[in-house]
């Protein structure tokens, strides 16, 4: 399914220290994590009990939920062994004019259809 890309940051963000931020694009909230010069985008709610993952912290390329310390791989979204859960991940790319996140076209179609 084709992706629709949305610019979420200018390149100046590359000079910022690592962060975890909540963003909203096209009505969809997600969590963006900067780890060194890499960016990851995942759902913002923890699949365990719904905590806001932007309140969590990173350990290398793992996102740790602040509530019960469940751990998720930022590259795959997979929860740590034994958790049996995962995060939805979104592709992020760095272009010459900024940082972009990609959503499947299906989402933008349904958003228009239901006026989300
Ligand atoms: S709500 Fe995230 S680990 Fe429990």
Image (cartoon, rainbow, N blue to C red):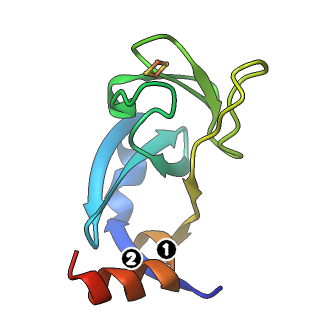
CA gap between label 1 and label 2 equals: 8 Å
x then y, percent, for residue 80: 72, 23
**Observer able to see residue 97:** no
Which mark is on residue 74?
A: none
x then y, percent, for residue 61: 64, 32
Q: Secondary structure at mark 2?
A: strand
Is residue 47 left or right of 30 when viewed as pictured?
right
**Disc nearer the start of the sequence (1/2):** 2
x then y, percent, for residue 92: 54, 63
Q: Nearer the viewer, residue 83 or 75?
A: 83
**Observer able to see residue 14:** yes
Is residue 5 left or right of 3 when viewed as pictured?
left
Q: Nearer the viewer, residue 38 or 6?
A: 6
* Residue depicted at 61% across the width and 88% down the height: 2
Pointer 1 local density, CA inside 10 Å: few below 14, some 14–19, many at least 20: many
Location of mark 2 (residue): 6
* Residue depicted at 25% across the width and 67% down the height: 27
Location of mark 1 (residue): 103
Contact (Cβ within 8 Å) of mark 1 with mark 2: yes
Task: Please identify the quarter of the rendering in which residue 20 is found.
Answer: top left
**Quarter the C terminus occupies:** bottom left
Q: Secondary structure at mark 1?
A: strand
Q: In front: mark 1 or mark 2?
A: 1
* Residue depicted at 65% across the width and 43% down the height: 77
Q: Is residue 82 above or below residue 13?
A: above
Q: Is residue 35 above or below residue 26?
A: above
């Amino acid at each position: 399914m084709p992706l629709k890309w949305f610019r979420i940051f200018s390149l100046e963000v590359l000079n910022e220290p690592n962060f975890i931020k909540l963003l909203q694009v096209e009505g969809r909230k997600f969590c963006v994590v900067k780890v060194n010069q890499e960016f990851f985008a995942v759902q913002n709610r923890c699949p365990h009990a719904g905590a806001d993952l932007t309140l969590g912290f990173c350990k290398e390329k793992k996102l740790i939920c602040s509530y019960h310390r469940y751990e998720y791989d930022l590259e795959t979204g997979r929860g740590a062994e034994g958790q049996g859960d995962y995060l939805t991940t979104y592709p992020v790319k760095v272009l010459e004019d900024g940082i972009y996140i990609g959503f499947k076209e299906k989402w933008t179609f349904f958003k228009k259809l239901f006026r989300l």
